[in-house]
Image (spheres, rainbow, N blue to C red):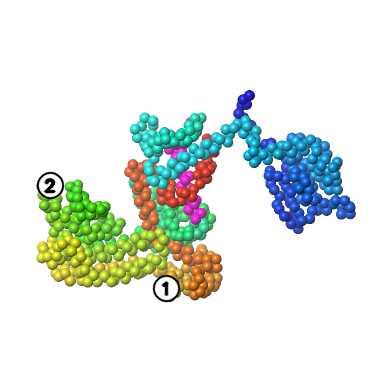
C-alpha cells in the first residue's frame, strides 16, 4: 500500500521517538571537592555515568551497602547516576518509554530516582527486578533501534515513508555547487556574462547563457540536476538576480579570508586612489597591505564618489577602514598611502590629516615613492630642451609609424632583421606613465637600424606611399642621424635606465622602507658614476649599430630645434656630451633632494635601527620614535630594551632572533614590513577595472564591479573557499525557495 507523503506540519525527526518522562531537565553537577575521571555524556548519546573518586554515603551507621558503586555501570549499561540527587535512573526508560505512568518501582527509575543501595543487587527488589519488567524491555528495544538509526544501520520512520527527503537537499547542493564553480570561473577569468537579450530567440544571449546551454548538452550529471531543480519551481537560479547574489556571496567570503589574515597580522596599511571607470563614474579603490608570513597587498573595496572634496573622501575611507577593523577584531591601521594630490596630502585639510586628527592620531601618510620617481622624470624632461626635443621626435615618429602602409613596412623590416623575436612598437607617450618614455627611448637605442631601414624603404618607394609620408620619412631619417640627436638620445637612455629600474623595484609588493632607502642610495650612486667617457662609448656603440660615423653626422645640416637654439650649445662632440651630462647630474640630484630627502625623515631614520647594515642596528634610542608614535601597538619600552639585549646576544652567538622571546621587537619588524611604500597595487586595480568594466559593460553597478574585482584580483584565495560554506552563506541571505 502506498502511503501519502507527510505534510509539512507533520514532519518528524529522529528525536520525535524519544518520549519525555518527567526528568527532562539535565542535572547540574554540584561544585564539590570530588574529582571526575570523565565528564558525563550528552543525554542523546547515552546514559550519564560519572565516575567519582568517592560517592556520597547514606546512613553511615548501617552495615549494609551505603553508597553507589561505579562497578554497577559494567553490569547494567542502561544505568545512569545523578550526582545532584545521589540517585540512579534508567536511561532507556527515562528517554524511550511510551508510558509515563507506572508502578512506584518503575517511577523510581524514571522520575524520583533509585537510592536503596542495600537492595540494589537483590534479584527481587533492585536493578535486576527492573531489568525484567515489561516497561524496561520495551524501552530498551526502542533505545537499541535508536542507536542503529544513529549508526546508519537502519532508517527512521521519515526516511521509510519519504525516501527522497534526504536526496532533495543533497541534489540541490550539488546543483548549486556547479553554478558556484561556473561563476567562479567566469569571474576569475574576467569574462563578461550577460547580454541585452537573453531570450530563447536571441542570436546573442551572452556567454553565461551559452555556457549553461553547452553544459546541458555535454554534461549529463548537470542536466539531470538542472531538470530536477527546475521541474517543480518557477525560479531559475541561472538568472541575472541569482548570479549577482552568488557573486556577492563569493566576494564577501574572499574578504573574510583577507580579514582573517589581517587579524593574525594585527596591523595593516590602507592604500587608496581614485579613477574614472568606463561609465565616467569617479571610483575610490582601497587595498590593504599586511604581513602574512610574507608581505601581501590585496584589493578589498571599490566605492563610487559623488563628491570629490577631502571631507567626503575622508568619510568614505573611514567607513571602509572601520569595516576592516571590526571584521578583523581590532586590527590597527598604521599607514595611509596615496598619490601626491593636494586633496590627499594637504597638511591642514587633506584626507590623511583629517583622518589623523579625528580618528587615528598615530596614522602616517606616505606619498607613493614610485609616483615621486614619475614626477622626478617628468620634471627632468620638461626642464630640459634636449630631452623635450627627443620626446617630441618620438611622439611624431609614433604617429608616423602607425599609418597602415608605414606600419606594414616596419613589420616587414623587423621580421627580416629579427625573425625569431616578437615585433615591438613605439609606446604612446602618456605623462602619468613615464615608463613608456623609457620603453620608447630603449627601442630606438637598442634597434635603431629597424627604424632607419623602414624610413629608407619608404623614401626609396615614392610610388607605393603617400608623398607626404615620403617627405616625413626623409625628415625623420635626417633628424635621427644628426650628432646632437644621437648624443642626447644615448645620454637620456643612460639616465632613464637607472630610473626605470628604481621605479620597478619601488612597485614591488615585498619592498619595505629599508629596501627603499637602499634602492634610492644605489640609484643615486649609479647615476653619479655616469661620466663623459661612458657616454662617449655608448654613443660610438650606437653609431656602430647604424653604420654611420659620428664625425660624418657633425657635417650634416641640423634643423633648428629647441635643443640647438641655445647660444650655449657646444659645437664639438666632447663639449656637447659634457654639457648635457653635467645638466643631467645636477638636475637629478636636486630632484632627489626635493622628492625623497625631505619626506618621512623620522620614519626612515627610525627604521635604520632595524637594518643590520647600519651602525644604529637594534638601538633603543633610534627605535624610540616608533615606540612613542605608534602607541596603538602597545609596545612596552622597558621590555623592548631587554629584548634588544637578548637579540644582540643571539646575533653574537650566530643564532636567529627568537620570535617568542622578542614579541615587542617582532611588532616593530612587522610594522616596518606593513608600512606601505607605493600605490602600485591600486593602480593595478584600475587596470583590472578597465578590463572588467569595458565600454560594453559600462552598466555594471559600482558594488557589482567591486565584487568582481575582489574575486579576480584575489583569485589565489579562491582555492581556500569551501563551496559548502558558500552555499550556506547564500542560503542564509534571505528566504530561499530551495531546501539546501
- Residue 644 in view: no
Q: Residue at x 49, y 75 (%)?
A: 652
Q: Residue at x 83, y 39 (%)?
A: 104
Which stretch appears magenta? 234-261
Q: Which tag, 2 or 1, sits closer to the chain's start?
A: 2
Would residue 54 appear left or right of 454 to someone viewing this image? right
> In which quadrant is the C terminus drawn?
top right
Q: Nearer the viewer, mark 2 or mark 1?
A: 2
> In which quadrant is the N terminus drawn?
top right
User: For residue 359: magenta?
Assistant: no
Q: Which residue is mark 1?
A: 614
Q: Nearer the viewer, residue 530 or 568?
A: 530
Q: In this rendering, is residue 80 above or below 288?
A: above
Q: Which residue is mark 2?
A: 464
Would residue 334 appear left or right of 203 to someone viewing this image? right
User: For residue 250: magenta?
Assistant: yes
Q: Residue at x 16, y 69 (%)?
A: 573
Q: Nearer the viewer, residue 607 or 178?
A: 178
Image spot of residue 182 (x, y percent): 44, 41
Real-space CA distance between mark 2 and mark 1, rounded to the nearest whole angstrom: 66 Å
Amino acid at each position: 500500500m502506498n502511503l501519502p507523503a507527510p505534510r509539512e506540519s507533520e514532519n518528524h525527526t529522529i528525536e520525535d521517538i524519544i518520549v519525555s518522562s518527567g526528568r527532562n531537565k539535565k542535572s547540574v553537577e554540584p561544585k564539590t571537592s570530588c574529582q571526575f575521571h570523565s565528564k558525563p555524556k550528552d543525554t542523546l548519546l547515552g546514559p550519564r555515568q560519572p565516575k567519582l573518586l568517592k560517592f556520597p554515603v547514606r546512613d553511615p551507621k548501617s552495615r549494609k551497602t551505603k553508597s553507589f558503586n561505579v562497578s554497577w555501570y559494567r553490569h547494567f549499561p542502561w544505568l545512569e547516576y545523578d550526582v545532584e540527587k545521589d540517585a540512579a535512573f534508567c536511561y532507556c526508560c527515562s528517554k524511550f518509554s511510551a508510558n509515563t505512568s507506572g508502578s512506584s518501582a518503575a517511577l523510581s527509575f524514571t522520575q524520583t530516582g533509585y537510592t536503596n543501595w542495600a537492595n540494589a543487587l537483590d534479584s527481587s527488589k533492585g536493578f535486576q527486578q527492573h531489568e525484567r519488567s515489561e516497561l524496561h524491555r520495551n524501552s530498551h528495544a526502542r533505545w537499541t533501534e535508536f542507536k542503529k538509526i544513529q549508526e546508519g544501520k537502519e532508517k527512521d520512520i521519515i526516511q521509510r515513508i519519504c525516501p527522497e527527503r534526504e536526496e532533495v537537499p543533497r541534489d540541490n547542493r550539488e546543483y548549486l555547487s556547479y553554478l558556484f564553480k561556473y561563476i567562479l570561473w567566469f569571474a576569475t577569468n574576467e569574462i563578461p556574462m550577460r547580454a541585452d537579450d537573453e531570450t530563447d530567440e536571441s542570436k546573442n544571449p551572452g556567454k553565461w547563457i551559452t555556457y549553461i546551454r553547452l553544459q546541458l548538452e555535454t554534461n549529463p550529471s548537470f542536466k539531470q540536476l538542472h531538470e530536477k531543480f527546475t521541474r517543480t519551481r518557477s525560479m531559475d537560479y541561472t538568472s541575472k538576480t541569482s548570479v549577482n547574489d552568488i557573486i556577492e556571496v563569493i566576494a564577501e567570503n574572499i574578504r573574510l579570508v583577507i580579514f582573517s589574515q589581517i587579524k593574525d597580522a594585527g596591523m595593516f596599511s590602507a592604500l587608496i586612489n581614485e579613477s574614472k571607470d568606463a561609465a565616467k563614474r569617479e571610483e575610490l579603490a582601497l587595498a590593504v597591505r599586511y604581513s602574512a608570513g610574507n608581505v601581501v597587498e590585496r584589493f578589498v573595496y571599490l566605492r563610487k564618489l559623488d563628491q570629490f572634496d577631502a571631507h567626503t573622501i575622508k568619510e568614505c575611507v573611514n567607513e571602509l577602514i572601520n569595516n576592516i577593523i571590526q571584521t578583523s577584531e581590532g586590527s590597527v591601521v598604521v599607514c595611509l598611502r596615496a598619490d601626491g594630490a593636494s586633496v590627499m596630502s594637504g597638511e591642514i585639510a587633506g584626507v590623511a590629516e583629517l583622518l589623523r586628527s579625528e580618528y587615528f592620531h598615530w596614522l602616517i601618510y606616505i606619498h607613493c615613492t614610485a609616483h615621486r620617481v614619475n614626477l622626478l622624470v617628468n620634471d627632468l624632461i620638461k626642464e630640459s630642451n634636449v630631452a623635450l626635443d627627443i620626446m617630441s621626435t618620438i611622439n611624431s615618429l609614433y604617429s608616423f609609424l602607425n599609418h597602415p602602409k608605414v606600419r606594414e613596412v616596419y613589420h616587414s623590416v623587423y621580421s627580416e632583421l629579427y625573425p625569431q623575436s616578437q615585433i615591438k612598437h613605439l609606446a604612446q607617450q602618456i605623462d602619468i606613465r613615464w615608463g613608456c618614455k623609457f620603453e620608447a627611448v630603449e627601442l630606438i637605442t637598442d634597434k635603431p637600424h629597424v627604424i632607419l631601414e623602414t624610413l629608407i624603404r619608404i623614401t626609396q618607394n615614392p610610388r607605393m606611399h603617400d608623398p607626404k609620408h615620403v617627405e616625413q620619412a626623409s625628415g625623420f631619417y635626417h633628424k635621427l642621424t644628426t650628432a646632437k640627436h644621437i648624443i642626447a638620445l644615448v645620454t637620456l637612455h643612460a639616465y632613464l635606465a637607472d630610473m626605470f629600474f628604481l621605479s620597478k623595484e619601488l612597485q614591488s609588493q615585498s619592498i619595505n622602507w629599508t629596501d627603499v632607502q637602499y634602492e634610492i642610495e644605489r640609484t643615486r650612486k649609479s647615476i653619479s658614476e655616469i661620466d663623459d667617457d661612458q657616454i662617449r662609448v655608448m654613443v660610438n656603440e650606437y653609431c656602430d649599430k647604424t653604420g654611420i660615423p659620428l664625425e660624418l653626422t657633425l657635417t650634416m645640416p641640423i634643423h633648428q630645434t629647441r635643443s640647438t637654439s641655445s647660444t650655449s650649445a657646444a659645437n664639438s662632440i666632447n663639449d656637447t656630451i659634457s654639457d648635457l651630462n653635467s645638466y643631467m647630474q645636477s638636475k637629478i640630484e636636486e630632484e632627489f633632494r626635493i622628492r625623497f630627502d625631505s619626506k618621512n625623515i623620522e620614519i626612515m631614520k627610525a627604521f635604520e635601527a632595524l637594518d643590520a647594515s647600519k651602525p644604529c642596528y637594534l638601538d633603543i634610542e633610534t627605535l624610540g620614535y616608533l615606540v612613542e608614535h605608534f602607541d596603538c601597538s602597545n609596545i612596552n619600552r622597558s621590555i623592548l630594551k631587554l629584548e634588544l639585549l637578548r637579540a644582540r646576544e643571539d646575533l653574537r652567538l650566530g643564532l636567529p632572533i627568537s620570535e617568542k622571546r622578542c614579541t615587542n621587537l617582532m611588532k616593530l619588524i612587522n610594522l616596518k614590513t606593513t608600512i606601505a611604500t607605493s600605490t602600485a597595487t591600486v593602480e593595478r586595480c584600475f587596470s583590472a577595472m578597465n578590463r572588467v568594466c569595458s565600454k560594453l559593460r559600462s552598466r555594471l553597478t559600482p558594488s557589482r564591479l567591486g565584487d568582481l574585482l575582489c574575486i579576480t584580483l584575489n583569485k589565489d584565495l579562491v582555492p581556500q573557499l569551501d563551496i559548502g560554506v558558500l552555499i550556506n552563506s547564500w542560503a542564509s541571505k534571505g528566504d530561499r525557495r530551495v531546501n539546501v
